Image (cartoon, rainbow, N blue to C red):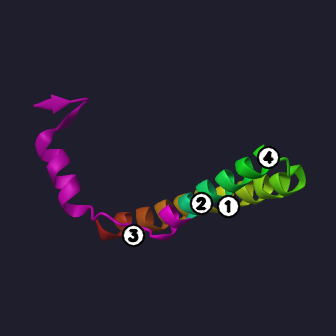
Amino acid sequence: MEKMGVTDSQLEELFEHKKRVKNPLVPIGAFVTAGVLTAGLISFRQGKSQLGQKLMRARVVAQGATVALMFGSAYYYGEQFKGSK
């Protein structure tokens, strides 16, 4: 069977060589981001707007770090995958 110009055997061959790699820092970053966001929203709800603003800024930093980790690990493991061929 052919899907978008790639046969099933080609897909199987690709996934045989590709190892699943997990970066434990990315889920940790996602949970930190969600936690800071939740704390910020609670602060706003309680009327603590200055604390809420600081937490929202911290959320942006945590979210940026998580995205940077995602791109960094994708680049690093992508280069390793290219080198293993």
Which quadrant is the C terminus positioned in? Answer: bottom left
Q: Nearer the viewer, residue 35 or 25?
A: 35
* Number of the label disc, if any, that sits on residue 80: 3
Total residue callouts: 4
Q: Secondary structure at mark 2?
A: helix
Q: Secondary structure at mark 1?
A: helix
Q: Of callouts 2 and 3, which one flags the residue occurring earlier in the amino acid sequence?
A: 2
Q: Of callouts 4 and 2, which one flags the residue occurring earlier in the amino acid sequence?
A: 4
Task: Say few, some or many: other residues with alpha carbon within 10 Å of mark 1 (under 14 / 14 to 19 / 20 or more).
Answer: many
Does the CB distance between marks 1 and 2 fall below 8 Å?
Answer: yes
Residue visible at 42% across and 62% down in the picture:
78
Q: Secondary structure at mark 4?
A: helix
Does the CB distance between marks 4 and 2 fall below 8 Å?
Answer: no
Residue 47 inside the magenta-drawn segment: no
Residue 56 position in % (x across, y down):
77, 52
* Number of the label disc, if any, that sits on residue 66: 2
Q: Marks 2/3: CA distance?
A: 21 Å
The stretch in magenta equals 1-28
Side of 59 relative to 2 (left or right):
right
Residue highlighted by disc 1: 62
Q: Of callouts 3 and 4, which one flags the residue occurring earlier in the amino acid sequence?
A: 4
Q: Secondary structure at mark 3?
A: helix
Task: Say few, some or many: other residues with alpha carbon within 10 Å of mark 2 (under 14 / 14 to 19 / 20 or more).
Answer: many
Residue 2 inside the magenta-drawn segment: yes
Side of 66 relative to 21 (left or right):
right
Residue highlighted by disc 4: 44
